[in-house]
Image (tube, grey):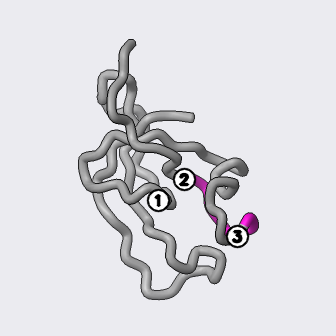
Amino acid sequence: MFLGVVRGTVVASQKDPGLEGAMLRIVQPVNHDRSPAGTLLVAVDGHASREGDLVYLVKGKEACIPWKKSSLAPIDAAIVGLVEGMSV
């Protein structure tokens, strides 16, 4: 699990059927102090995040688990929560 900041939205008129209804967000991975920690990535958003929101994500095989519509959807990263506060 890692942190990221939502930077934008991907609009796709055609998607894999397993991603039907999915909102795709552009996310900047960040460290605990919000400094960039890697390159931008696209993540499935099941939590209605908005641009600028601090979120936590999962990557890899586990990313399709939260997406209830299809466990076989081609998902590499998924937003699994919105960060409301953090203490380090």
The residue singled out by tag 3 in the image is 70
Which residue occupies the extreme top position in the image? 88
Q: Is residue 70 above or below residue 12?
A: above
Q: Nearer the viewer, residue 38 or 81?
A: 81
Tell me the element at label 2: strand
Q: Is residue 42 above or below residue 73?
A: above
Q: Nearer the viewer, residue 69 or 12?
A: 69
The picture places residue 68, in percent across and down from the top left corner, at 65, 64
Quarter where residue 50 is shown: bottom left
**Amino acid type indicated by mark 2:** Ala
- For the N terminus, the quadrant is top right
What secondary structure prevails in the magenta region?
A: loop
The residue singled out by tag 1 in the image is 45
The picture places residue 62, in percent across and down from the top left corner, at 70, 48
> Residue drawn 38% across and 33% down?
30
The residue singled out by tag 2 in the image is 78
Q: Nearer the viewer, residue 69 or 41?
A: 69
> Residue drawn 58% across and 74% down?
19
**Amino acid type indicated by mark 3:** Ser
The picture places residue 85, in percent across and down from the top left corner, at 33, 27
The Cα atoms of the two marked residues, 3 and 1, are separated by: 14 Å
Quarter where residue 54 is shown: top left
Q: Which residues are magenta?
A: 71-77
> Residue drawn 29% across and 45% down?
53
Residues at circles 1 and 2 in contact by the CB criterion of under 8 Å? yes
